[in-house]
Amino acid sequence: MRLRLPHISWSWSLPAAFILYFVAAFAPFPFGSTNDLSIAFWCLCLGIALIFAPTGDLRKPHLWLLAGIAIIVAGYAFVLHEQLSDHPWAAPFQPIWKQASDLLQMPIAPSASIVKNEAFFALGAPLANILAIVLGISVGAERERARRILWVIAISGALYAFYGVLSFLIEPTMILWRDKTAYLGSVTGTFINRNTAAAYFGSCAVIWILLILEDFRRRLPERHIAWRRLSLDLREIPPKEILPQLLALLICLMAMFMTTSRAGVGLSLLAMIVATTVFLRKDLPPRTGIWIALGSGVVIALGLLQLLGGQVSSRFDSQGLVDEGRVEAWKSTLRIIGDNPWFGTGMGTFQWAFPPYRSPHISIRGIWDAAHSTPLELASEVGIPMALLVAAGWTIMLLVLANGVLGRRRDAIIPLAAAATATLSLLHSCLDFTLQVPGYSIPFFALFGAGLAQSFRTAEVRPTEETIACQAAGRGAHGARRRALPAEARAS
């Protein structure tokens, strides 16, 4: 499976494409891009790329997708206005401002947010994600550019995984040039949090598995896999052409297991099993084939978990699936939502809103600056209506990607990779805050956009006489190869 670099001629789409590749590759580098300066830089890069975004390959379904994103943007703009304005149209003022005014015996201008102007500074990460998915649709509307996005994320992910494993073995107390203050016994790569690192390495492993399977499938001579002689067909593949990809997959898996993240590892393995089964669904035996593939995948996953994930297994045994403190934090967040159902407490204000609602069953150590559930935290900060609008956007995106996986004849790997990683990140964000880390979300929102763009069939092109002749010659050569096989092989 060689990454062929075709001859590239200048076009106005190149700046947008290369900037998007650059951002997708380097967003995880500066400690997961969690600080405001990094987020502002990526927003600037993506904004410049949007100026040069190609539109020639966009079709009517793509325009509908962009219209849907525009509705979500309008929703964010309305909530932002309500939380920043001194005279909101519909949002009530937070009672905390009147209480503070009464205590200080001086007038204080009220606000719909519990922290004034914080919504403006918290807008960076959602803005970067929106720009990434819009550029993913625009740039990824052309199949070769969409494939390059897939390769950029896969290769950069393998490099980050290699760095993570190597740095853990050499100097586990450092992340890049800073001291590592937490998760000293876990690989985090360039991320601060091991759970986000696990989801990132697992998502990259999903992409590598699909790329390898696609290459294997392309090299097989039959339209459907002949399982009885599969090993003979695989032996014909030169090792030097497939070993680099297998090595990249192994590095991503190793780094993922070494994070010791329970949810990250478990959901990543589940995504790999389901993505592999969906990819091979047409080649599996009818009725029982799907269940055999899923069962085999579970057995392999459990074997890998025992072989490479000993610490992950021990954490499952000692702590179960979810920490008790996290469950209590979710209950506290639900109380925040109950008291602020329409417009929330303000974007980016969770760490200030949480203390009055903090459950007594949670340890007094530390500050809860995240709800460890992105949907709950979103609803607590922007209100239930806006959270439902975002949820509707995710639902439509997953349905479109599923349609692309089941409907496309070629390049189905692109919507499949996007659907698998989107499901993985969404499920993991229900237990943690993966999608709130721009170093993870920006590259994969770009992939989601490319997957959406490639979820619609292109117009059928009428074959030329030269193409028909080449296809006939190929069928003749294939028939000669079949006749040269033993009789039992032909029968299979």
Image: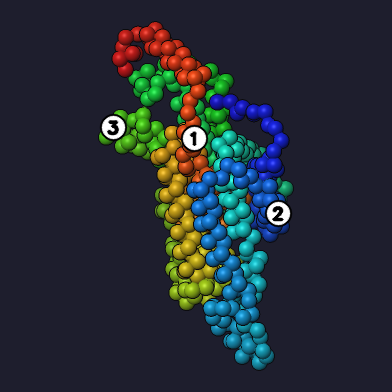
**Nearest-to-viewer mark from 1 and 3:** 1
Name which residue type carries label 2: Leu
Q: Which residue is mark 1?
A: 411
Q: Which mark is residue 286?
A: 3
Q: Secondary structure at mark 3?
A: loop
* On screen, residue 234 above or below 459: above
Q: As drawn, is 408 to the left or to the right of 59?
A: left
- Please state, as top left, top right, bottom left or bottom right, where the N terminus lies in the image: top right
Name which residue type carries label 3: Pro
Q: Mark 1 and mark 3 in contact? Answer it, CB < 8 Å.
A: no
How many numbered discs sit on the rendered protein?
Answer: 3
Q: As drawn, is 288 to the left or to the right of 146?
A: left
Across and down, in percent, residue 346 comes to 57, 71
Across and down, in percent, residue 370 comes to 55, 63
Tell me how far mark 2 sits from mark 3, CA to CA: 51 Å
- Mark 3 Cα-neighbour bin, 10 Å: few <14, some 14–19, many ≥20: few
Q: Which residue is mark 2?
A: 44
Q: As drawn, is 84 to the left or to the right of 338?
A: right
